[in-house]
């Protein structure tokens, strides 16, 4: 019997929103890195489908500009509708996971479980006016920020070398968002959150902390990666760190080199497992993303 695998983060919905060829996701395709056929072949029984609204203005390369709520809602809605269409057209092969029982069903059967994740909370509205609606549609995992500022906090910019200590922490709205997600049972992802925001969340949350796609700063000193103290805090909360396959977050020189050795992924697994225990290490990947 093989152990089912869960992938903690991929950006297939964003890729499909650009191509419009979402039917290929169900049948298999050479495009992109993620589809249902390859998931079956790799024994991946569930994955986190991220909705990432693209910045309307490039801003600074290291620190993208904020995105307007209306633009985020429109972009996110388009990606959620793709996932709903995929679920409907899959004839039971793909199911949006809304509960632990639903996830267990997928892990023990032939259905691929799709956990709906928002990468940045802009689409919730600055006063959380859309949160309940998104929850009803399946939102179960949330990154408070991507690597840009919003009403809730400050995303960590793309800097190398740099610590993740790059600015202020969560805003008062961000603190309210943490409480609201705890109440609803929405998992909070710290992968793009700066260090001050991380510690604000850690002090407030009553749920395990998860980094769906982050690596150890000790091996790759990129601002996006987690310090040893952050890694320990995640483990102490009962949480998980999903190792990120992004080349620039693996390499000690921070280069985006596609010839990067898979051995660096294994080094990240070894390091994080050695520091906080194997029970707190997961597969993040960031396929179809970085």
Image (cartoon, rainbow, N blue to C red):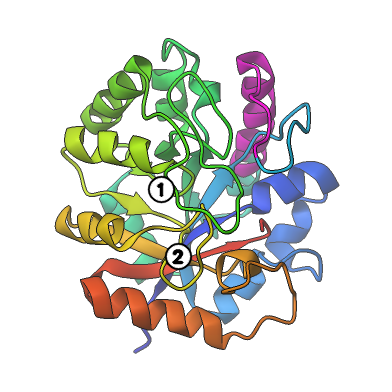
| Prevalent SS, magenta region | helix
Highlighted range, magenta: 63-84
Find the residue positioned furthest to the front: 161
- Dot 2, how many residues are within 10 Å of its Cα: few (below 14), some (14-19), or many (20+)? many
Q: Is 198 displayed left or right of 52 in the figure?
A: left
Position of 159 compared to 225: left or right?
A: right
Q: Position of residue 146 (x, y in %)?
A: 54, 38
**Picture coordinates of residue 147, whole percent (x, y):** 57, 40
- Dividing the picture into quadrants, the one containing residue 242 is bottom left
Place residue 186 in its image quadrant: top left
Residue 29 or residue 274, whichever sits in front: 274
- The tag earlier along the polypeptide, 1 or 2, is 1
Above or below 20: residue 284: below
Query: Pointer 1: residues within 10 angstroms few (<14), some, or many (20+)?
Result: many
Badge 1 marks a residue whose secondary structure is loop
Left or right of residue 131, residue 76 in this image: right
Residue drawn at x 59%, y 85% is 262
Read off the residue under disc 1. Answer: 97
User: At x 20% / y 43%, what residue is drawn?
Assistant: 207
Question: Residue 270 appears at what percent x and percent y?
Answer: 36, 83
Relative depth, front residue between 198 and 122:
198
Kindly identify which numbered label has been placed on residue 215: 2
Expressed as whole percent of the image width and height from the top left, the position of residue 105 reads 33, 60
Q: Which residue is painted at 37% across and 43% down in the image?
A: 195
Does residue 20 show up? Answer: no
On screen, 236 above or below 137?
below
Determine if the magenta segment contains residue 79.
yes
Q: Secondary structure at mark 2?
A: loop
């Amino acid at each position: 019997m093989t152990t089912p695998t869960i992938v903690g983060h991929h950006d297939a919905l964003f890729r499909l929103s650009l191509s419009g060829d979402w039917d290929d996701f169900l049948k298999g395709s050479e495009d992109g890195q993620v589809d249902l056929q390859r998931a079956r072949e790799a024994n991946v029984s569930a994955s986190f489908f991220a909705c990432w609204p693209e910045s309307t203005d490039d801003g600074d390369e290291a620190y993208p500009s904020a995105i307007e709520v209306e633009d985020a809602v429109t972009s996110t809605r388009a990606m959620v509708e793709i996932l709903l269409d995929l679920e409907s057209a899959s004839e039971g092969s793909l199911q949006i996971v809304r509960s632990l029982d639903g996830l267990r069903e997928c892990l023990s059967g032939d259905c691929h479980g799709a956990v709906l994740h928002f990468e940045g909370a802009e689409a919730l509205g600055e006063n959380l006016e859309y949160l309940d609606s998104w929850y009803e549609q399946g939102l179960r995992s949330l990154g408070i920020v991507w690597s840009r500022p919003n009403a809730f906090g400050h995303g960590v910019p793309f800097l190398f070398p740099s610590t993740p200590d790059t600015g202020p922490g969560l805003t008062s709205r961000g603190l309210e968002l943490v409480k609201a997600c705890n109440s609803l049972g929405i998992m909070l992802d710290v992968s793009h959150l700066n260090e001050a925001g991380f510690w604000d969340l850690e002090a407030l949350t009553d749920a395990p902390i998860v980094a769906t796609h982050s690596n150890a700063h000790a091996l790759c000193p990129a601002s996006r990666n987690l310090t040893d103290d952050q890694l320990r805090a995640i483990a102490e909360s009962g949480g998980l760190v999903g190792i990120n396959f992004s080349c620039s977050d693996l390499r000690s020189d921070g280069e985006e080199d596609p010839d990067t050795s898979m051995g660096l992924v294994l080094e990240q697994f070894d390091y994080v497992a050695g520091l906080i225990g194997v029970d707190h290490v997961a597969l993040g990947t960031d396929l179809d993303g970085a």
